[in-house]
């Protein structure tokens, strides 16, 4: 199961990097949990895939390039909800 989730996460971010919103939505849960608290200070929230990809579609295509580099943790802490995949990542938006 862990490798399946890791593959889904990789395919999801590749779709986002290509701005392929249909492919990204097909890989998302509904609702989709987002946590931008480290960037914005806002609380994490649950959103619909349609709403989130619509917001990204207004923002991401204006960059010359977008790349999400992910590193999936090889161990999942006890008590982590399933399916969940703790990840460390870096996002690059290039103009």
Image (tube, rainbow, N blue to C red):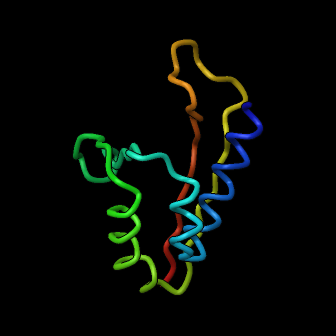
> How many discs appear?
0
Left or right of 56? Residue 78 is right
Residue at the outermost top position: 78
Left or right of 60? Residue 71 is right
Task: Determine the residue positioned at 52% across, 21% down.
Answer: 80
Camera-side residue of 39 and 47 = 47
Residue at the outermost right position: 3
Dividing the picture into quarters, in which one does residue 59 lie?
Answer: bottom left
70 is higher (above) or lower (below) than 33: below
Camera-side residue of 34 and 53 = 53
The x and y percentages for residue 41 are 23, 46
Camera-side residue of 79 and 21 = 21
Task: Determine the residue positioned at 68% across, 54% down.
Answer: 10
Left or right of 75? Residue 12 is left
The x and y percentages for residue 86 are 57, 34
60 is higher (above) or lower (below) than 40: below
The x and y percentages for residue 26 are 56, 59
The x and y percentages for residue 69 are 63, 57
68 is higher (above) or lower (below) than 37: below
Quadrant occupied by the N terminus:
top right
Dividing the picture into quarters, in which one does residue 33 lie?
Answer: top left
């Amino acid at each position: 199961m862990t490798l399946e989730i890791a593959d889904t996460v990789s395919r999801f971010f590749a779709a986002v990097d290509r701005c392929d919103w249909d492919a990204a939505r097909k890989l998302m849960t509904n609702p989709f949990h987002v946590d931008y608290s480290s960037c914005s200070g806002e609380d994490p929230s649950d959103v619909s895939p349609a709403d989130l990809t619509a917001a990204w579609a207004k923002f991401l295509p204006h960059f010359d390039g977008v790349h999400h580099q992910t590193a999936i943790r090889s161990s999942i802490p006890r008590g982590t909800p399933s399916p969940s995949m703790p990840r460390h990542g870096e996002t690059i938006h290039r103009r």
